[in-house]
């Protein structure tokens, strides 16, 4: 990239959202530069290479729908594709639409500053390179800032250790080794069930158990894929109707209108179905009504007890501090059965916390675990982490990092007052920030953002900014939607909790998600555009 490069629009992030935005803007004739700190494209799917990494979304609902030809070309191989297949898909998209010429890799953005006089953003990379643009669109990912535990001695370990996000690109020889995994979220679950049979010893350091449900993966035959291709309109229409953009639609009969025996029969069916059926295809009350949620949680607890031979161990794997589905649900394949193996050991950190990492392994208050490899599946500084890392400076020198110290506030999850001409795709409190089928959520945001910039061009305008009133109103709506949900009480990334990040570890709510559902969000975006973006200052 030439020194001082400039474009009408600068996009940050070459993942699922950034590639989509690049396509939409180029299709409307904008000059665009997309920068990414990674050596290649793919975002989440470039980095997460741990064994077992795969979708929890049905593969055929994950592709872009902006091109019928693209939908026709690509055949998913598995119902829930593994990471290499998804990365292959994104590379296929980039080749098919010739996206690479507008992408600059290894551009690690460390700062982005707004200049009022020139009405432009300047982005600076760690190596000093700069790029400027009239508009800045961030597509930095909601789970792209991995966090490590704050453990004494963490750097002293003599074996191999890494966060799952940074799983090495060269093969990791874990077969026959003593491996420790810290963390049992969606990532830990996928990793543990995948490596259990190959490693010599597996110590799972679990602080709090998670609820999980069966994934139900399997191959997609050529004939099935032909059928899916013929039904894409129907499939995407189903995604559009659901709150999270998945094929699973909630049951609207009403939990208490259905007799208990019928509820249990229904849950048995859902438990056998693939994907998030038991979570997102369930009665809506499981998300809002504590008694309904408790009954389902007891059903799921019984499933865990059936699958783990040792009853004491089973009890340790059943969450006691939160009900089913109020945190992001990991999906599993033989996860509980892994704990029936002699070489897999659960270390319950509630009884015996980790004291330190040593050169030879991990010491708890109870004993020392000798390890060859330690894997930290300890999650992310979710949604706002990427914004904090970059350091984005708006009007009057205010940084987003400072402004969002106690939690973010946005307008539509896309705009922030004081940060003109910035669009945060997948930003906090927007339709792309939660437990959503990510491509379905960001396709509306990216398309809508491109329409806004087109509107600016057509009307000869060059500056937009959310008004403080619009932002305050949206924030109040976000809080109101959150308060309806049982998830408001759970300590997980859904509520902005992260024990490893100072300031995010005190349990004070940080509103990261929009819980109003995809339909309401889509309708709002449409109305805002139809109003001529009335709640924004355009000049
Ligand atoms: P996560 O859900 O935040 O889980 C992190 C795990 O690490 C938790 O078990 C947590 O325990 C534990 N942990 C964190 N700090 C710790 C510490 N200091 N000491 C001991 N344990 C610690 O992170 P994740 O599993 O990476 O998943 C994040 C999100 O990524 C998921 O919710 C999902 O949205 C996405 N994801 C998706 C897929 C997929 O689509 N298939 C796969 C993987 C991830 P506590 O619960 O006690 O905090």
Image (cartoon, rainbow, N blue to C red):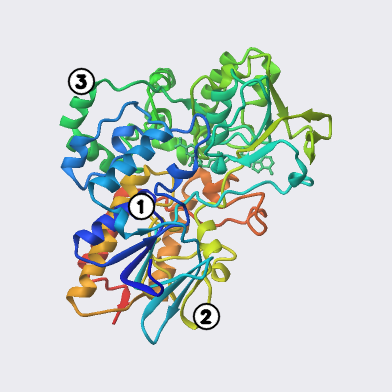
CB of residue at label 3: within 8 Å of ligand 1?
Answer: no
For this orientation, the residue located farthest to the right is: 366
* Residue at numbered disc 3: 223
Residue toward you, 202 or 33: 33
Q: Quadrant of residue 189?
A: top right
Q: Residue at x 46, y 61 (%)?
A: 107
**Real-space Cα separation, disc 1 to disc 2, in angstroms:** 28 Å
Q: Residue at x 20, y 20 (%)?
A: 223
The mark found on residue 17 in the picture is 1
Q: Quadrant of the N terminus?
A: bottom left
**Real-space Cα separation, disc 3 to disc 2, in angstroms:** 58 Å
Q: Which numbered disc, 3 or 1, marks the residue that appears first in the sequence?
A: 1
Q: Position of residue 247 (x, y in %)?
A: 30, 34
* Residue at numbered disc 2: 397
Task: In the rendered view, tell whether residue 28 sits above or below residue 216.
Answer: below
The mark found on residue 94 in the picture is none
């Amino acid at each position: 990239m030439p020194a001082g490069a400039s474009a009408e629009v600068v996009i940050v992030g070459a993942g699922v959202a950034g590639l989509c935005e690049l396509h939409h803007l180029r299709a409307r004739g904008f000059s665009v530069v997309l920068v990414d700190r990674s050596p290649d494209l793919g975002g989440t799917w470039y980095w997460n290479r741990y064994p077992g990494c795969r979708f929890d979304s049905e593969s055929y609902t994950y592709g872009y729908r902006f091109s019928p030809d693209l939908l026709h070309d690509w055949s998913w191989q598995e119902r829930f594709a593994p990471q290499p297949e998804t990365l292959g898909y994104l590379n296929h998209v980039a080749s098919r639409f010739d996206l690479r010429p507008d992408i600059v890799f290894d551009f690690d953005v460390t700062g982005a500053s707004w200049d009022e006089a020139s009405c432009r953003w300047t982005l600076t990379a760690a190596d000093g390179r700069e790029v400027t643009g009239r508009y800045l669109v961030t597509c930095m990912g909601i789970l792209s800032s991995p966090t490590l535990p704050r453990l004494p001695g963490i750097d002293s370990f003599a074996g191999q250790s890494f966060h799952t996000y940074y799983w090495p690109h060269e093969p990791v020889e874990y077969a026959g080794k003593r491996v420790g995994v810290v963390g049992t979220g969606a990532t830990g679950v996928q990793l543990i069930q995948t490596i259990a049979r190959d490693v010599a010893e597996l110590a799972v350091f679990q602080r709090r158990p998670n609820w999980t449900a069966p994934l139900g993966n399997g191959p997609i035959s050529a004939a099935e894929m032909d059928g899916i291709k013929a039904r894409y309109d129907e499939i995407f229409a189903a995604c559009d109707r659901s709150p999270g953009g998945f094929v699973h639609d909630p049951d609207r009969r009403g939990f208490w209108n259905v007799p208990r025996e019928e509820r249990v029969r229904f849950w048995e069916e859902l438990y056998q179905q693939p994907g998030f059926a038991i979570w997102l295809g369930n009665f809506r009350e499981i998300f809002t009504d504590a008694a309904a949620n408790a009954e389902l949680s007891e059903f799921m607890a019984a499933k865990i007890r059936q699958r783990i031979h040792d009853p004491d161990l089973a009890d340790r794997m059943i969450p006691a501090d939160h009900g089913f589905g109020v945190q992001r649900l990991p999906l599993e394949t033989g996860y509980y059965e892994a704990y029936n193996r002699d070489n897999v050991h659960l270390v319950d950190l509630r009884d015996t916390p980790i004291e330190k990492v040593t050169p030879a392994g991990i010491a708890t208050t109870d004993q020392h675990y000798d390890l060859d490899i330690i894997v930290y599946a300890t999650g992310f500084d979710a949604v706002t982490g990427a914004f904090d890392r970059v350091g984005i400076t708006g009007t009057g020198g205010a940084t987003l990092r400072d402004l969002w110290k106690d939690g973010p506030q946005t307008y539509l999850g896309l705009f922030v007052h004081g940060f003109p001409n910035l669009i945060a795709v997948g930003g906090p409190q927007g339709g792309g920030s939660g437990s959503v089928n990510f491509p379905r959520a960001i396709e509306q945001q990216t398309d809508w953002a491109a329409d806004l910039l087109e509107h600016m061009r057509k009307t000869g305008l060059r500056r937009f900014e959310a008004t403080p009133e619009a932002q305050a109103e949206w924030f109040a709506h976000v809080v109101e939607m959150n308060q309806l949900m049982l998830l408001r009480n759970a300590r997980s990334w859904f509520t902005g909790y992260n024990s490893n990040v100072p300031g995010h570890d005190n349990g004070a709510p940080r509103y990261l998600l929009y819980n109003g559902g995809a339909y309401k969000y889509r309708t709002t975006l449409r109305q805002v555009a139809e109003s001529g973006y009335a709640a924004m200052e355009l000049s």
